[in-house]
Amino acid sequence: LGIAEFLRRNGRPQEALKWAKDGVFVFEDNPDVRLTLACVDLLDEAGERGEAEQMLWKGFASQPSGQIYSALASRFRPRRTMTDRAVALLEERLARPSPSARRDYLIKPLMLEILTDEKRFTEAWSFVARHNIALTSPDVGRLADKSADQNPDEAVKVWRMRIEELAGLGGNGNYVEAHALTLRAAKLASRSGQQTGHAAFVADLLTRHKMKRNFVKLFS
């Protein structure tokens, strides 16, 4: 990558492209996202847009990443068709037998990130359920925040778990965050006619944490 960048800066784009393509080939089994994207840029500059797009899809299939997805998203229209293909590739990878926990660790958050950013919330929540992803994970928390208006029941469930966690951890900062989440949940409950259930949750929460005066007084 360093040699390709040097050649590019010094006005030798054809040589830079050759070095970059050779590097992508050499590291095909363990691809470097930065090298792939650099090669794609050089292909674009050389007018080889079709080859650049093929390289992006090949890179995403072998080493999925948010960076490559963003590069794909900037090129393809309609965007939903591109996302469908990316999601299918991720699902295919997850379906393959693999002894590597690292694969799931990398791909599941990426899938949730893509579905959340593309506002495909129903698919995202289905993915969470099918793969038993912890509702306390930051990725699910982000999904809950983004999809609260469309999926209020799921969002409230996640927020309540987060509220319990924050109250249990203690500390004024955590108390303030827990209280703010409680207020957000109250608004959703009011819109869906679930005020009684929310009030019961808050009452039980305060009863169990009644010794934490700084927490309790936020609700007074």
Image (cartoon, grey):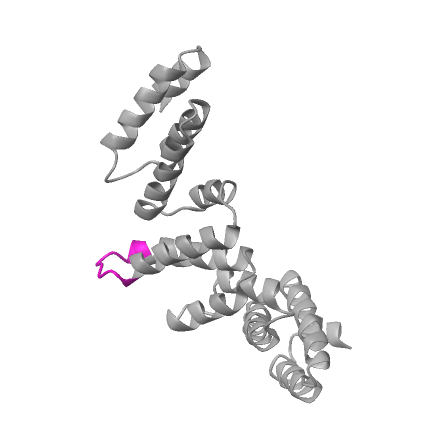
Quadrant location of the C terminus in the rendered image: bottom right
Horizontal relation, residue 172 to residue 106: left or right: right
Residue 22 lies, with reference to residue 214, above or below; the image says: above
Residue 211 position in % (x across, y down): 64, 78
Work out whether residue 140 or residue 24 is closer to the camera in this orientation and state it.
Answer: 24
What range is drawn magenta here? 95-103
Work out whether residue 39 or residue 144 is closer to the camera in this orientation and state it.
Answer: 39
Q: Residue at x 35, y 39 (%)?
A: 54
Residue 65 position in % (x across, y down): 41, 46
Horizontal relation, residue 92 to residue 146: left or right: left
Quadrant location of the N terminus in the rendered image: top left
Q: Residue at x 21, y 59 (%)?
A: 99
Residue 196, image quadrant: bottom right
Residue 168, image quadrant: bottom right
Residue 77 position in % (x across, y down): 52, 47
Reply yes or no: does residue 11 show up in magenta: no
Work out whether residue 119 or residue 27 is closer to the camera in this orientation and state it.
Answer: 119
Residue 72 position in % (x across, y down): 46, 43
User: Is there any visible trace of residue 181 in the rendered image?
Assistant: yes
**Residue at the outermost right position:** 220
Reply yes or no: does residue 101 show up in magenta: yes
Residue 51, image quadrant: top left
User: Is there any visible trace of residue 136 in the rendered image?
Assistant: no
